[in-house]
Image (cartoon, grey):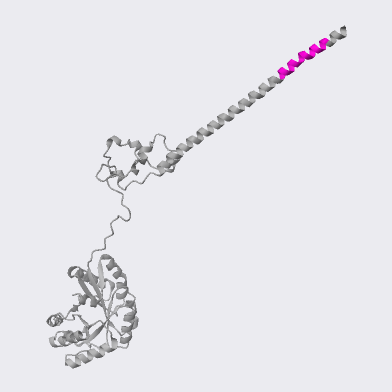
Amino acid sequence: MKKVQQNTKKKNLKTAKKPRRRLKIKRSDAIWAFILAGALVAVSICISIVVINVHSKSKNIDVAAILKTEPEQPPDAEQQPSPLPEQSPSPELSPTSVKITPDATASPKPAVPVQPVSKPQTQPKPGANSVNPKPVTTEAEKPAVKPPQNLGSLVFMIDDAGNNLRELEPFLGISGPLTIAVLPGLPHSAEAARRIRTAGKEVFLHQPMEAIGAQAPGPGAIYSTMNTEEIRSVLKRNLAEVGPVAGINNHQGSKITMDNEMVETILAFCAEQGLLFLDSRTTAETAVPSVARNLGIKIGERDIFIDNEQNKESMNNYIKNGLAKAQKTGSAVMIGHTWSPELAPLLAEQIPLFIKQGYTIKTASDIIKTK
């Protein structure tokens, strides 16, 4: 009986212990469940924070993009008052007062409205009130740059070529039209004329003629003692040496150009040969202009001698006189000489400047033909 009771007690003890084990297991499960729930809450909070930050950044990017894509204002936009006061934003929020800097685009103020920023994108209708009354002009609509005013035509004529090829060379490199007159009967007359033509410059026969004084005019000269046939013969021989040429101008010749009959013989010969004549005006009493008018022939006339003194300052002053003459009468013929060492560099420097100022550089034949 005691054994039965003892066994019964043991069974009761076992059954009493089992519920305690189940309760212990349930507590541990509750603890793990609590920990897991806490972890889920923490993860949820972190995810929410990340989502909120991403959303906030996306808003900032949108505002920055709007600021970056704002169209440029016309040059006078800041100076024009707004004709619509009821729609004008406050000065703090005005599109013209907002400076777009790297700091502003990185973190724009949330108070800046989107509408004032994008407002300049709307083009105003013609005649309507607008913040920008002057339209933006494109490159195609910009007015063309006006060319400089035409101040007149300039002719630079260089005499006495044929004696020295070294002195001639600097003039051949000058850009633009240039007339060079070659003396006949000199060691390099024919070669000088050939080089001038090759360089694209205009050639004249620099015809020697007798002067009032005792100066020797040089080979191939016309003298007052010659008759008509002798004059024509001299001209033909000289042209055969240096031709073809565009025309003739006189070397010295004050005595010849004062004689009406001799001038008439020379001009008539030029007309027959299709040549032009330019009077170097070595005397104020020249008969060339009056005889030319009687014959109905166009001639040219020298206005300025550039190198009466062979220094740069003096030559510049004479050229300035020529510029004034061109502005007053429309053209100026200026004569220099190959033996002036500073003349070629001066012309090479100044001629491009004259063109920019509005002068036109022409040859002697151009001026004579347009008279």
Q: Is residue 295 left or right of residue 65?
A: left
State the quadrant of the C terminus. Answer: bottom left
Residue 150, quarter of the rendered image:
bottom left
Question: In the figure, 209 relative to 129: above or below?
Answer: below
State the quadrant of the N terminus. Answer: top right
- Residue 248 placed where, x, y %? 23, 83
- Is residue 13 shown in magenta? yes
Q: Main secondary structure of the magenta part?
A: helix
Front position in the image: 75 or 3: 3
Residue 329, quarter of the rendered image:
bottom left
- Residue 169 placed where, x, y %? 34, 79
Residue 167 visible at all: no
- Residue 84 placed where, x, y %? 27, 38
Front position in the image: 88 or 245: 88
**Residue for point 65% across, 24% down:** 33
Q: Which residues are magenta?
A: 8-24
Question: In the figure, 201 relative to 236: above or below?
Answer: above
The number of numbered badges drawn on the structure is 0
Residue 108 visible at all: yes
- Is residue 335 shown in magenta? no
- Residue 321 placed where, x, y %? 21, 70
**Residue for point 82% across, 12% down:** 10
Residue 359, quarter of the rendered image:
bottom left
Question: In the figure, 231 relative to 338: above or below?
Answer: below
